[in-house]
Amino acid sequence: MSKQGFTTSIVHGDRIGGTEHGGVRQPIHTSVQYGFERVEDLIGVFQGTKKGGFNYARQGTPTTAALERKITSLEEGVGTICFSTGMAAITATFLTLLRAGDHLISSRYVFGNTNSLFGTLRTLGVEVTTVDACDAKNVKDAIRPNTRMVFVETIANPGTQIPDLQGIGNVCREHGLAYVVDNTITSPALFKPKAVGASLVINSLTKTIAGHGAALGGAVTDTGLFDWSAYPNIADDYRRSAAKEQGLLQIRKKGLRDMGASLSSEQAHSIAMGAETLALRVKQSSANALALAQFLEGHEAIGKVFYPGLKSHPQYEIAQALFKGASWLLSFELLNAERMIDVVNALQLPIKATGLADTRTLIIPVAPTIFFEAGAQTRKEMGISDGMLRLSAGIEDIDDLIADFSQALKLAA
Ligand SMILES: *Cc1c(COP(=O)(O)O)cnc(C)c1O
């Protein structure tokens, strides 16, 4: 069969290869233990010579494996490992592929908890440099002899900065660095980081891929582009596998099996159900975000609007060239920050909540919540004003959203 379209492959992928009783979805396998008729097969699963077998659910179940295949197919990778959360996937990637004395370069604009994790990495002896990755030259200039890895996010939250994804991919290839791209905000429906040379792609499945806000999960996918046989930190035990498999094998054994942040089958099933409508949801939520951004940009009560689908955005051209849409994430500034509480309370539809990529629109004031712990100085450096609101557009009918913002913003005058 010729290569299938994105949504076709998601909704038909499960039954290809066969399911029990012809079920069109993978069932939820709740067994922790897996028994074998012959002990040779048990031994084979332990040693990795018997492919596709299971021994203990901490390392995976048939249900989590089915989700891993789905994510691999969406990202056009060679393999995926799922974790209990997006943060677990990121933590496992760093802790298993970096060692004390190594150097990591990251975009300065990353998810707050990832930034906090860099502090932990530093206490373990990993040097971390954060740069403005919107210019690939800043990444290149930060490279040291001990640099091993570069980490970026496709669209930063809440400022919506987009790194020079292609330029950084070129720098990483020239210098043999592992290039890790957090694709959470765009998701494979809008962008496949493999196209810019990513080695590993991270997705918080909690967000765009599940989309319902009813399950936590994370994934790391190997694109197959990186030569792990040349990477110094792979343990001898995993050198015996094919070069392409070594990175993920080490993450599965050291990061999933040993650290134990495993995804449950129930959550994997819930995420897989949400993923079926990924492309449809993202199309609608991105269209809503664009319409809201245009409406807000023209509104007298609003200052800056941060949305990569607007021509005023500094990386508008990159978004147009690389992404199928500018995503559901936008931020904007209320000119009169003192009116913020009243305006947000007057909104009827958007839920006043943290979290991202739900079917329902979510809104949160940035400075007093997700960037409160960062302090005033860091907020200033990151361009986060007191009147900044972050919005995660849902799939509601756009006229309802615009009408709601129109009435609430009357209070901002
Ligand atoms: C939410 C988020 C994460 C963490 O995902 P969880 O599933 O909540 O742990 C990582 N990266 C980005 C860009 C995120 O938005």
Image (cartoon, rainbow, N blue to C red):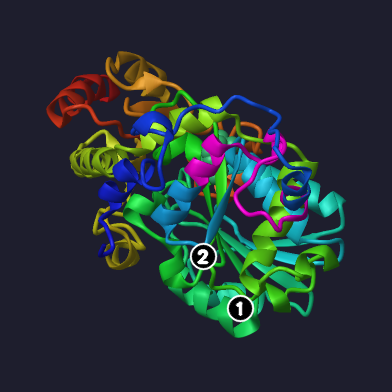
How far apart are the alpha carbons under marks 2 and 1?
Answer: 22 Å
Which mark is on residue 289?
A: none
Horizontally, residue 241 falls left or right of residue 1, namely right
- Pick whichever of labels 2 and 1 is earlier in the sequence: 1
Tell me where the magenta segment starts and ends, as one range. 45-68
The location of residue 204, given as percent across then percent down, is 52, 42
Which mark is on residue 140?
A: 1
Decide which of 204, 53 is in the foreground and name it.
53
Q: Residue at x 67, y 54 (%)?
A: 50
Horizontally, residue 41 falls left or right of residue 19, namely right
Query: Within 10 Å of the Cα at label 2, are there few (<14), some (14-19), or many (20+) other Cα atoms?
Result: many
Which quarter of the frame holds ligand 1?
top right
Q: Amino acid at mark 2?
A: Thr
Q: Is residue 63 magenta?
A: yes
Q: Residue at x 73, y 58 (%)?
A: 250
Query: Within 10 Å of the Cα at label 1, are there few (<14), some (14-19), or many (20+) other Cα atoms?
Result: some
The location of residue 340, given as percent across then percent down, is 39, 24
Tell me: residue 192, above or below residue 145.
above
Decide which of 208, 367 is in the foreground and name it.
208
The location of residue 19, given as percent across then percent down, is 42, 37
Tell me: residue 48, above or below residue 218.
below
- Determine the secondary structure under disc 1: helix
Q: Which residue is mark 2?
A: 223
In the rendered structure, are the residues bearing label 2 and label 1 in contact, judged by CB atoms less than 8 Å apart?
A: no
- In the rendered image, the residue lying farthest to the bottom is 174
Nearer to us: label 2 or label 1: 2
